[in-house]
Image (spheres, grey):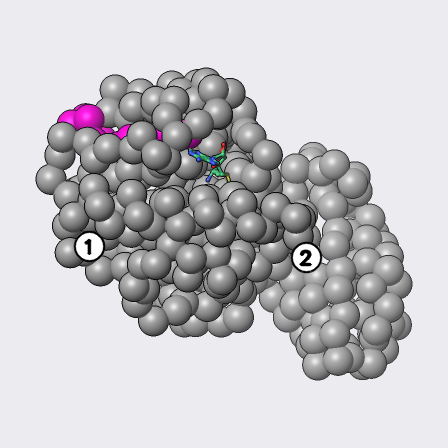
Amino acid sequence: MEPFDIFLVCAPGLEAPLADEARALGLAPGLGVGGVTVTGGWPDVWRCNLHLRCAARVLVRIGSFRVMHIAQLDKRARKFPFSDILRKDLPVRVEASCQKSRIYHDKAAKQRVEGALVAQGFTLAEDAPVTLKTRIEDDLCTFSLDTTGEPLHKRGHKLQVGKAPLRENLAAAFLRQCGFDGSEALVDPMCGSGTFVIEAAEIAAGLAPGRDRAFAFENLGSFDPAQWAALKSGKTEQPTLRFFGSDRDDGAIRSATANAERAGVSGFTRFTRAAISDLMPPDTPPGLVMVNPPYGARIGQRKLLFALYGSLGKVLVDRFKGWRVGIVTSDAGLAKATGLRFRPPLPPVQNGGLRIALYRTDPLR
Ligand SMILES: C[S@@+](CC[C@H](N)C(=O)[O-])C[C@H]1O[C@@H](n2cnc3c(N)ncnc32)[C@H](O)[C@@H]1O
């Protein structure tokens, strides 16, 4: 069946940094909404899952056909060569969604596809290791396989999180949008569970984000364990100590330290308990300050947040000459309260229930 279409899913707004990453893997991405399409074979699917930091999951398009009514879906799905890809000894889970189509009932569509799979000798389970996604749009039914399983932001290292952790794939995309490539120092003065610092350190060390986790594609007939092991044995480096996190909360520092340990980057990251008012630049050439201050608080607390953003901006201007700054927040008014001069805005991105955006400066003067 190779080559085939591979859809790299990301949070809407992050298509451009994801496309850059795909290009760096030697693929030719086409921008979509909420993702990027590339063409490739199974080794490309494994590489994308292993290396892409900005993606949420990797889907393989396995076929499509037109459907005007539910009986037709039933008939065509029964004829679909699922056994070319799925293994009969493992159960499968079906998801279905319908949009702008004569078939409009998600549940009915799901049942028909499940019936077709059972008729072909497959078993079903809601906790199956492999998910078949059925999307009916404009009367076109497309089957895709989710090759990822647990979403890609779950790298398997950040087991301890605080109240409002940033998803790793968003953090990676924001670092990329600030021009971070691993060769400079990074400071996060409100580091929480350490997401920015750990992502930055991994990028510098050449550690693949998916190196320590399992993927759904390991349960497909196309999986080749020897090739996969070879892909995972890429070269890594031991950078100098230049990735620093601080937070005023003791628990955050404990979590970040443990997360960095699990990720294998504790040799070149350092986490210290400190409030913004005590922040000093490390003894490195200027690099990037990346920070995700508290936001989304109730009305009464907004005044305090204005003061916090104000002092953050002042500390950075006074002490971090030559450093670039990236601030991630849901509130444009709070970003403005830093008094920093930002470059033109980027599209906002959904993180949990909130729309957040990255505000970037040039090197501070
Ligand atoms: C939104 S969270 C950061 C989450 C982090 N990006 C992560 O992925 O886990 C904001 C953090 O700012 C810290 N914080 C709030 N006020 C602070 C201050 N004045 N000085 C230092 N840290 C502060 C909080 O303790 C919290 O961990």
What is the three-letter code of the residue carrying label 2? Lys
Query: Is 163 left or right of 199, judged from the image as shown?
Result: right
Identify the residue at image location x=11%, y=40%. 285
Residue on which disc 2 sits: 133
The kind of secondary structure element at disc 2 is strand
Residue at 57% x, 59% y: name it: 355
Which label lies toward us, 1 or 2? 1
Q: Residue furthest left?
A: 285
Mark pair 1, 2: CA separation: 47 Å
* CB under 8 Å between discs 1 and 2: no
* Frontmost residue, 129 versus 192: 192
Pick the front one: 256 or 137: 256
| Residue name at image x 16 percent, y 48 percent | 321
**183 to the left or right of 65:** left
Q: Which residue does the image show at 38% across and 54% down from the upper left?
A: 338
Rendering coords of residue 317 (x, y %): 24, 50
Question: At label 1, which amino acid type do we have?
Answer: Leu
Q: What segment is highlighted magenta in the picture?
A: 235-247
Q: Is residue 338 above or below residue 280?
A: below
- In the image, residue 128 lies in the stretch drawn in magenta: no
Relative vertical location of residue 44 with respect to residue 104 in this rendering, above or below: above
Q: Which mark is residue 37?
A: none
User: In the rendering, which numbered label is found on residue 364?
Assistant: 1
Which residue is at the front of the view, 329 or 11?
A: 329
Among the two numbered marks 1 and 2 on one chain, the one whose residue lies closer to the N terminus: 2
The part of the image, by quadrant, that contains residue 184 is top left
Crowd rating for badge 1 (residues with CA inside 10 Å; few <14, some 14–19, many 20+): some
Is 142 left or right of 60, judged from the image as shown?
right
Instruction: Find numbered disc 1 in the image and state the secondary structure of the residue it sits on.
Output: loop
